[in-house]
Amino acid sequence: MKHENYEILNLLGYGLSKFNMKFIRAFGYKTKQGFYDYMVSLGIAETGSTIKNRQDLFDPFFDNGRKGWWQKGDTYIHRKHLIDSLYGDLSVACFADIVKLYLVEKFGFKDKFISNATPIQKSRFKQLQSTGLEAELFFQHNFQSVGLFANGNLEDARLLGDGYDYQITLPSKILLAEVKGVRKSGGAIRLTEKEYKTACHYKEVFTLVVISQLSNTPKITVISDPVASLKFTVQTFQSNQINYHLRQREW
C-alpha cells in the first residue's frame, strides 16, 4: 500500500543512500537518529524505522557498502530511475534544497526551511509527482520484457507532438506506443484529441501501454488498436487562453 508521504519518503531514502552523512549534515544534523527524529516530528513518518526502511530500499542501487533490501532485486529500481532522471546530476547541497522545497510546499514549514532551488529545479520538482513521466521512464527501461516489443529498437517521439510517445522498430514491422500511468491497479486514463486521431490513423500499429501499480510494483498492459478494443467517451473542455502580444518592431 502506498504511504501517504510516498514522494518525500523516496526523496529521503534516495538522499540517505546516495549521499549518506553529507545529506544529513545538509539539514544541520550530526547523527542519523537526530535526522530521523526530526522528520518524524514533522509528521512525515510515524517512526524513524520507516525512513530507514526507505533508505534500505535504495541501498542496493548505490555503491555505498550497504546491501539494503538486496533480496528484492530490481523490484523498486523504477523509483530510482525517476529521481535520477530529475535530480541525478545534482550535488548533495542542491538535492537537499529540492527536499527542503518539498517540505516548504507540501508541509508548510516556510519558517524553518529556506530553499535556494533554481527555477529549473522547481520545474523538475513538479514533474516528480507526474504519473506520466514515471510511467514513461518505466516503459523505457522495461519495454523489451513485453513479448510484442522484444528485440525492438526504441525511439523517443515525445517532443514531436504527433500523438504517440515512442516508436519501436522490430525486424518485421514498426509499432507506435502511447504510454499512460496510474498509481493503483485500476484507474481512468484519457487520450487527447491528437492521440485519439493518431490511434485511428495508425490503428494497425498503434498500441496503448498502461503502466499500473506505480506506487508498488509496476505492471505493463498493452492494448493493440485501442480505439477498436476499448470504449472511449468524448469529453469536451473549454478554456480561455491568454496571450501577450508585442507590436511589430525592428530587431
Image (cartoon, grey):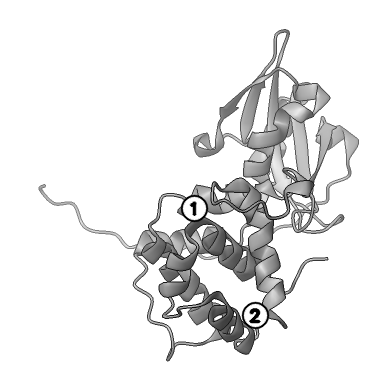
Q: Nearer the viewer, residue 171 or 70?
A: 70
Q: Nearer the viewer, mark 1 or mark 2?
A: 2
What residue lies at 61% left-to-right and 47% top-to-bottom? 61
Q: Nearer the viewer, residue 15 or 90?
A: 15
Q: Quadrant of the N terminus?
A: bottom right
Q: Please tell me how crowded label 1 is: few (under 14), some (14-19), or many (20+) other residues with Cα within 10 Å.
A: some
Q: Please tell me how crowded label 2 is: few (under 14), some (14-19), or many (20+) other residues with Cα within 10 Å.
A: many
108 sits left or right of 242 in the view: right
Q: Which mark is residue 46?
A: none
What residue lies at 76% left-to-right and 54% top-to-bottom? 182
Q: Which mark is residue 86?
A: 1
* Circle 2 SS class: loop
In the image, residue 8 above or below residue 202: below
Q: Is residue 219 visible?
A: yes
209 sits left or right of 41 in the view: right
* Circle 1 SS class: helix
Query: What's the amino acid at mark 2?
Result: Ile
At which x and y percent is residue 147? 82, 23
Q: Which residue is mark 2?
A: 44
In the image, residue 38 above or below residue 101: below
At which x and y percent is residue 44? 64, 80
Q: Nearer the viewer, residue 6 or 71?
A: 71
Query: What's the amino acid at mark 1?
Result: Leu
What residue lies at 78% left-to-right and 66% top-to-bottom? 2
What residue lies at 67% left-to-right and 78% top-to-bottom? 48
At which x and y percent is residue 203? 77, 26
In the image, residue 78 above or below residue 141: below
